[in-house]
Amino acid sequence: MLRDITLGQYYPVDSPIHRLDPRTKIVLTIVYIVAVFFGKGLLGYLPTLLFLLLIIKLSGVPFTMMLKSLRPLRILLIFTFVLNLFFISSGEVLFRWRFIQITKDGLSHALRFSLRLIFLVLGTSLMTLTTPPVALTDGLESLCSPLKKIGFPAHEMAMMMTIALRFIPTLIEEADKIMKAQSARGADFSSGSVTSRARAMIPLLVPLFISAFRRAGDLAFAMEARCYRGGEGRTRLHILKFRKGDAVAFVITGLLIPVTIFAGRLL
């Protein structure tokens, strides 16, 4: 399960999506999220689905890797679907057995909210899979730089977010090593009830937290040894520049919201 978490991982390949400016990908991800919430009815999610499939195809990221990002959320997806399916009683009754009933509105809400969660996870995962952490830092800082006039620490905020994303795969790998070491000593993480498996995961937390604090201390010492003093006066190896591909991406993604609204009204 730990290996299925793709948040913070980068998939290196040469594709039109990888070559986009990181600021473009951040802004367009926000537009995509807004479009997902504008979708009404199952037909309203069709433009979002087609757009997502197109971007995944252009990115060169294997579709199986994209589906891996959904595996850690399968319990949440099932819970969301069941909660909306059985606890919304309005609309035409499709199925009834004793105290259990499924209505048309309940089925519609269950499908829509589950699809919304799936689209959000896949869209945000695609941004981190196609953007290196350093480029993501530069993009966030550039977008937040106008807020520096009111005292907002744009560079520090971007650095903290990127370091957090960067260390997610590292901590996952560390947790996997600790789990294998404890399994070799007789620990059981795969059998028993959900409660017993959750209790078995508790011994992982102490060594994992110790490792995280040790890595954080090493990173702080390394940054101080290189005379890191924040964003003031710093230069960059790669200067961010908007290109023709970014303009095309803005135009295509900008059409997503009105098309989604129009498709939702057709239902």
Image (spheres, helix red, strand yellow):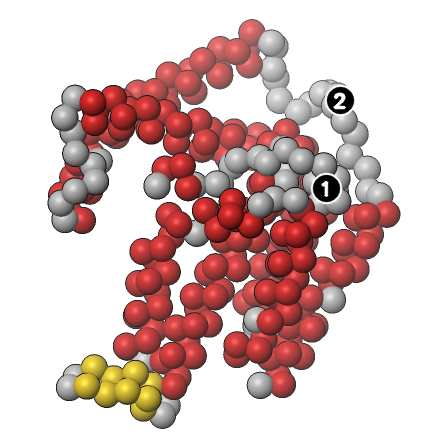
Amino acid type, callout 2: Leu
Name the residue tied to disc 1: 15
Image quadrant occupied by the C terminus? bottom right
Q: Is residue 149 visible?
A: no
Vertical order, 214 against 240 (above or below): above
Residue reaching furthest to the right: 244
Q: Which numbered disc, 1 or 2, marks the residue that appears first in the sequence?
A: 1
Residue reaching furthest to the top: 225
What percent of the width, then of the height, locates residue 168?
A: 45, 33
What percent of the width, then of the height, locates residue 75?
A: 31, 56
What percent of the width, then of the height, locates residue 27?
A: 67, 51
Nearer the observer, 118 or 261 = 118
What percent of the width, then of the height, locates residue 186?
A: 14, 26
Secondary structure of the residue carrying tag 1 is loop
**Quarter assignment of residue 30:** bottom right
Secondary structure of the residue carrying tag 2 is loop
Instruction: Count neighbours of disc 2 (C-alpha within 10 A) and say few if under 14, some if 14 to 19, many if 20 or more.
Output: few
Q: Is residue 212 visible?
A: yes
Vertical order, 160 against 15 (above or below): above
Name the residue tied to disc 2: 237
